[in-house]
Image (cartoon, rainbow, N blue to C red):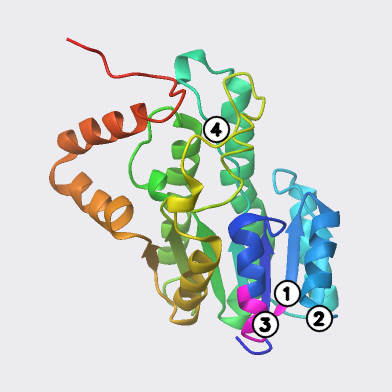
């Protein structure tokens, strides 16, 4: 990664922040995008480097994404890696959820990936670089109470898998990375049925993979030009395998597991 130009969206917190530090430690030149520019500037100061470009970016806005890419080219002259990491979550039953929540989650998670990729793609093709999307295990199996989130992550996976095939012979590398539950602030700011942030995480963050470990493994997968990365064994690889072999069983297991969350929007019915 030494001297490679790496764009990371959603870099102000969580996995994105950890990715910035990980790629910086590998010698990359960073272009960071997020809505909270002050947090990006704080991160830049912490890493103590002038080779970091910070751009206020709301990935749901096409022009913001174009501006991020344009700024990167003006500053560094090339793009070697684009990591579409920016994302939001939600927690509510679909039949109780305002449709604005579905649109908001899709605008950030799916169209944010589409927007940034559209403008970065010519430069990635030129450099034979890497295009990466951070999805979730929710992009392989449906998570009840998180319909918009799962739908957006399935969509990102389909989008990137298709781009990989379209560019099979021109050297573009496409990675779809699916972390399991990872400790970050995504659950605190997850949207509820009316679009307001839930404020508290319903899960034990201390038992999850750290954002730093997740970032290390994603960076390693980019370096090795892997096509997919599914993190954690039980919540990740085993769950995806079980969905292929015994899908009906997995439906029941996921329902029961998610119903046990504190203040779950649905409960197991007692016979």
Q: CA distance from mark 3 to mark 2?
A: 9 Å
Where does the magenta region start and end? 22-29
Q: CA distance from mark 1 to mark 4?
A: 29 Å
For label 3, the residue is 28
- First in sequence: mark 3 vs mark 4: 3
- First in sequence: mark 2 vs mark 4: 2
Q: Position of residue 47 (x, y in %)?
A: 77, 76
Q: Position of residue 264 (x, y in %)?
A: 43, 24
Q: Are marks 1 and 3 in contact (CB under 8 Å)?
A: yes
Give neighbour class at mark 4: few <14, some 14-19, many 20+ (Cα, 10 Å).
Answer: many
What secondary structure is marked by label 3?
loop
User: What number is the disc on residue 30?
Assistant: 1
Q: Position of residue 260 (x, y in %)?
A: 35, 29
Q: Are marks 1 and 2 in contact (CB under 8 Å)?
A: yes
Determine the image quadrant of residue 34. bottom right
Q: Using the rendered image of the protein, determine whether residue 67 is visible from the camera's viewpoint.
A: no
User: What number is the disc on residue 247?
Assistant: none
Please state, as top left, top right, bottom left or bottom right, where the N terminus lies in the image: bottom right
Q: Is residue 77 above or below residue 158?
A: below
Q: Are marks 1 and 4 in contact (CB under 8 Å)?
A: no
Give neighbour class at mark 1: few <14, some 14-19, many 20+ (Cα, 10 Å).
Answer: many
Rendered residue at 55%/37% (across/down): 201
Rendered residue at 27%/29% (across/down): 256
What secondary structure is marked by label 2?
loop
For label 4, the residue is 90
Q: Are marks 3 and 4 in contact (CB under 8 Å)?
A: no
For label 2, the residue is 51
- First in sequence: mark 1 vs mark 4: 1
Give neighbour class at mark 2: few <14, some 14-19, many 20+ (Cα, 10 Å).
Answer: some
Determine the image quadrant of residue 197. top right
């Amino acid at each position: 990664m030494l001297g490679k130009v790496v764009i990371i969206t959603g870099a102000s917190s969580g996995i994105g922040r950890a990715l910035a530090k990980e790629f910086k430690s590998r010698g990359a030149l960073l272009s960071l995008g997020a809505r909270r520019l002050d947090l990006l500037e704080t991160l830049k100061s912490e890493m103590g480097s002038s080779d970091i470009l910070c751009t206020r970016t709301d990935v749901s806005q096409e022009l913001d994404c174009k501006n991020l890419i344009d700024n990167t080219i003006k500053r560094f002259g090339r793009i070697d890696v684009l990591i579409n990491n920016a994302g939001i979550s939600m927690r509510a039953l679909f039949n109780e959820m305002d449709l604005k929540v579905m649109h908001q989650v899709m605008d950030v998670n799916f169209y944010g990936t589409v927007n940034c990729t559209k403008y970065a793609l010519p430069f990635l093709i030129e450099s034979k670089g890497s295009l990466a999307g951070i999805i979730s295990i929710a992009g392989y199996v449906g998570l009840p109470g998180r319909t918009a989130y799962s739908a957006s992550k399935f969509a990102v996976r389909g989008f990137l898998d298709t781009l990989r095939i379209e560019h099979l012979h021109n050297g573009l590398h496409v990675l779809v990375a699916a972390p399991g539950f990872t400790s970050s602030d995504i659950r605190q700011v997850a949207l509820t049925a009316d679009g307001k942030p839930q404020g508290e995480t319903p899960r034990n963050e201390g038992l999850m993979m750290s954002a730093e470990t997740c970032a290390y493994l994603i960076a390693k997968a980019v370096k090795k030009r892997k096509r997919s990365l599914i993190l954690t064994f039980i919540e990740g690889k085993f769950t995806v395998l079980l969905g292929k072999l015994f899908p009906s069983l997995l439906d029941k297991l996921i329902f029961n597991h998610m119903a046990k969350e504190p203040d779950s929007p649905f409960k197991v019915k007692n016979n």
